[in-house]
């Protein structure tokens, strides 16, 4: 997929979305976005801002709108290229919501209510346990199945949702005839899970109230290095990956992903050095990686017309592909068409 609506038939289709909440963190970057950038050469790539999914949590409209635009600009700054991938806003392609409704009618309540993330998010947002929280995995299934996706990059916390997607595709195919491609998960070998700098037993999260727990791709160098200096480490002084050393293990994971080195290489590089030296080295490596991204982001975010054009073009390309699937689905379930 290089230009227009053409896809390379020899390449597999890979699809992924990211919710526009806050800014893209180091965890998002190493766990997803960096891999997206690499995938563009090897796959027919479709990437979107999952703004419909983000509505499950109450947000101030003007701030939410700006955050979504910021996220789009950050993806461009990270090297997600409209020449090599389709990139768009989920809400700009109506077929996502239409297919989600049809899939809802083929999803059992028990399946949706068993989703671990639904239970977790319901506990976190007890004052707003809306249907969107329960229906989130069905919309995710629609996202994936619309484009006959072969592969879906998923973190550990999304594997259950992908399994539901596969179940729904198989169920629909058995009931109505071959319609959907059953997708597989794609889990990168490195950087799949980056943990909080303040609680290395928890995933790094944009919503963490402790600012020192996360690093953003558009943070300045001083902020990045300072937060790594404050990162929680473990007892002892040995720099190595061990189950009883989650803090240092997390920092080694980050450094190895940024510097493209194995954990063993990192351990040898810092053998005999202290935690303080290692934390500064990790912070400086991350800051160096993010400097050009931060500069590109500043350029993109100052040109709203360009962002609008790229988003519109991406949505149009996505809609053409999505409509092919949706038209077939509507016919299979017996909806009228003239």
Image: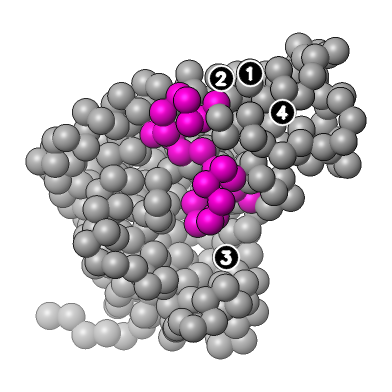
What's the mark number on residue 252?
A: 4
What's the mark number on residue 166?
A: none
The residue at the point 63 percent across, 18 percent down is 281
Q: Is residue 281 above or below residue 94?
A: above
155, 272: nearer the viewer = 272
Q: Is residue 119 above or below residue 143?
A: below
In this figure, which residue is indicated by the disc labeled 2? Answer: 285
Q: Are marks 1 and 2 in contact (CB under 8 Å)?
A: yes
On the image, the x and y values in percent for residue 291 come to 40, 22
Within the magenta stretch, is there residue 20? no
What's the mark number on residue 161?
A: 3
131, 319: nearer the viewer = 131
Q: Is residue 329 above or below residue 13?
A: below
In this figure, which residue is indicated by the disc labeled 1? Answer: 281
For the residues labelled 1 and 2, the Cα–Cα distance comes to 6 Å
Within the magenta stretch, is there residue 215? yes
Task: Give the residues in magenta.
Answer: 203-225
Q: Secondary structure at mark 3?
A: helix
Q: Secondary structure at mark 4?
A: helix
On the image, the x and y values in percent for residue 173 come to 50, 72
The residue at the point 33 percent across, 61 percent down is 51
For the residues labelled 3 and 2, the Cα–Cα distance comes to 34 Å
Locate residue 118 relative to residue 148 in the image: left or right.
Answer: right
- Total numbered labels placed on residues in the image: 4
On the image, the x and y values in percent for residue 267 come to 80, 19
Quadrant containing the C terminus is bottom left
Task: Name the outermost residue toward the left.
Answer: 305
Q: Secondary structure at mark 1?
A: helix
């Amino acid at each position: 997929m290089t230009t227009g609506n053409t896809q390379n038939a020899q390449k597999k289709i890979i699809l992924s979305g990211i919710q526009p909440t806050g800014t893209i963190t180091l965890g998002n970057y190493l766990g997803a976005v960096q891999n997206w950038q690499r995938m563009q050469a090897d796959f027919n790539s479709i990437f979107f801002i999952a703004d419909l999914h983000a509505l499950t949590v109450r947000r101030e409209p003007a701030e939410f709108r700006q955050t979504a635009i910021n996220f789009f600009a950050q993806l461009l700054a990270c090297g997600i290229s409209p020449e090599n991938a389709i990139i768009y806003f989920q809400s700009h392609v109506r077929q996502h919501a239409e297919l989600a409704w049809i899939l809802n009618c083929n999803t059992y309540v028990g399946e949706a209510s068993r989703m671990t993330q639904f239970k977790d998010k319901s506990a976190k947002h007890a004052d707003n346990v809306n249907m969107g929280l329960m229906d989130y995995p069905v919309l995710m299934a629609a996202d994936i199945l619309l484009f006959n996706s072969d592969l879906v990059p998923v973190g550990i916390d999304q594997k259950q949702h992908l399994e539901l997607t596969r179940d729904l595709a198989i169920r629909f195919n058995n009931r109505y005839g071959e319609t959907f491609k059953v997708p597989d998960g794609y889990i990168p070998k490195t950087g799949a899970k980056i943990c909080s700098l303040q609680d290395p037993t928890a995933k790094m999260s944009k919503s963490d109230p402790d600012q020192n727990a996360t690093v953003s791709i558009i943070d300045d160098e001083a902020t990045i290095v300072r937060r790594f200096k404050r990162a929680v480490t473990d007892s002892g002084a040995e720099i190595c990956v061990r189950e009883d050393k989650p803090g240092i293990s997390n920092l080694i994971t980050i450094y190895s992903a940024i510097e493209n080195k194995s954990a063993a290489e990192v351990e040898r590089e810092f053998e005999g050095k202290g935690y303080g030296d290692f934390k500064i080295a990790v912070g400086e490596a991350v800051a160096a990686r993010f400097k050009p991204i931060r500069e590109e982001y500043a350029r993109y975010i100052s040109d709203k017309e360009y962002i609008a054009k790229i988003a519109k073009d991406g949505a149009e390309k996505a809609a053409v592909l999505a409509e092919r699937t949706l038209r077939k689905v509507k016919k299979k379930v017996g909806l009228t068409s003239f």
